[in-house]
Image (cartoon, rainbow, N blue to C red):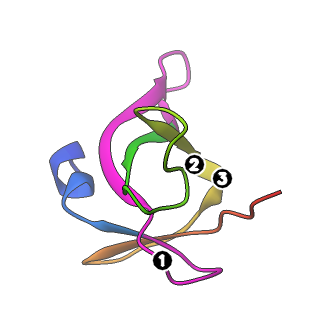
Amino acid sequence: MLLSELQNKTLINILDGKNVGNIIDVKIDSEKGSIISLIIEPNKKGLFSGKNNYSEIEWKNIKKIGEDVILIDITLG
């Protein structure tokens, strides 16, 4: 899968069904060659609004990558 394909998918939090934001980049572990996290630009009314210009979703929080959406599990604590 290409980064451009990931960027076209909608990020949905499975806990509340909300659109979390848009993928703008990924963080990669260069030694292992694996994805650490997705870098997202949050929705203005979304989960991370008002904090930073971007946020990270750890790869372990991704539950399913589908044709149109990426389902994530983000618990606010």
Marks 3/1: CA distance? 19 Å
Residue 27 pos. (x, y %): 45, 29
Q: How many marks?
A: 3
Mark 2 highlights which residue?
59
Q: What residue appears at the point 50 percent right and 34 percent down from the top-left corner?
A: 34
Mark earlier in primary sequence (3, 1): 1
Residue 28 located within the stretch drawn in magenta? yes
Residue 24 pos. (x, y %): 28, 40
Label 1 secondary element: loop
Mark 3 highlights which residue?
60
Residue 51 pos. (x, y %): 55, 37
Say if 64 sits above or below 54 in the image.
Answer: below
Q: What residue appears at the point 74 percent right and 64 percent down from the top-left corner?
A: 75
Q: Choose between 71 and 77: the one closer to the eye.
A: 77
Q: What residue appears at the point 37 percent right and 57 percent down from the top-left corner?
A: 43
Amino acid carrying label 3: it is Lys
**Corner quadrant of residue 67:** bottom left
State if disc 2 and disc 1 touch (CB < 8 Å): no
Marks 3/2: CA distance? 4 Å
Residue 13 located within the stretch drawn in magenta? yes
Amino acid carrying label 2: it is Trp
Mark earlier in primary sequence (1, 2): 1
Say if 11 sits above or below 58 in the image.
Answer: below
Q: Choose between 50 and 35: the one closer to the eye.
A: 50
- Mark 1 or 2, closer to the camera: 1
State if disc 2 and disc 3 touch (CB < 8 Å): yes
Q: What residue appears at the point 55 percent right and 24 percent down from the top-left corner?
A: 32
Label 3 secondary element: helix
Q: Range of the magenta residues? A: 12-36
Mark 1 highlights which residue?
18
